[in-house]
Amino acid sequence: MNWINELSLLWETLGIALIAAAVCVACAALICKAAKKKPNKKVLAVIGAAAFVGAILAVILIARTPMPI
């Protein structure tokens, strides 16, 4: 039964990371649009990957922090 909880946490973490990456890519595209420059797909992909990894690390660090009672 414990593995179900672990899989649930995994999917939740991946969902949070994907949403954070999508928000970062959208913000980068809007910044490029505001600067009147054509967004480079390779740069947007790197931004998305970095945001995904950063969000995963943030969730892991937050999960390790004990909650105050």
Image: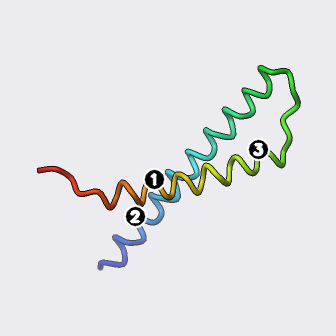
Residue count near mark 3 (Cα–Cα under 10 Å), binned few <14, some 14–19, many ≥20: some
Residue 24 x/y as whole percent = 63, 39
User: Which residue is denoted by mark 3 in the rendering?
Assistant: 44
Residue highlighted by disc 2: 9
- Tell me if label 2 and label 3 are in contact, CB under 8 Å: no
The disc placed on residue 67 is none
Percent x, y of residue 4? 36, 74
Q: Amino acid at mark 1?
A: Ala
User: What residue sits 11% from the left and 50% below the top?
Assistant: 69
Residue at x-position 68% and y-position 35%:
26
- Single out the residue that lies furthest toward the left: 69
Q: Is residue 33 above or below residue 23?
A: above
* Pointer 2 or 3: first along the chain: 2
Q: Earlier in the sequence, mark 2 or mark 1?
A: 2
Kindly state the secondary structure of the residue where label 1 is placed. Answer: helix
Give the residue number, with chain letter if any, for mark 1.
Answer: 58
Relative placement, left or right, of 15 versus 8 is right
Which residue type does callout 2 highlight?
Answer: Leu
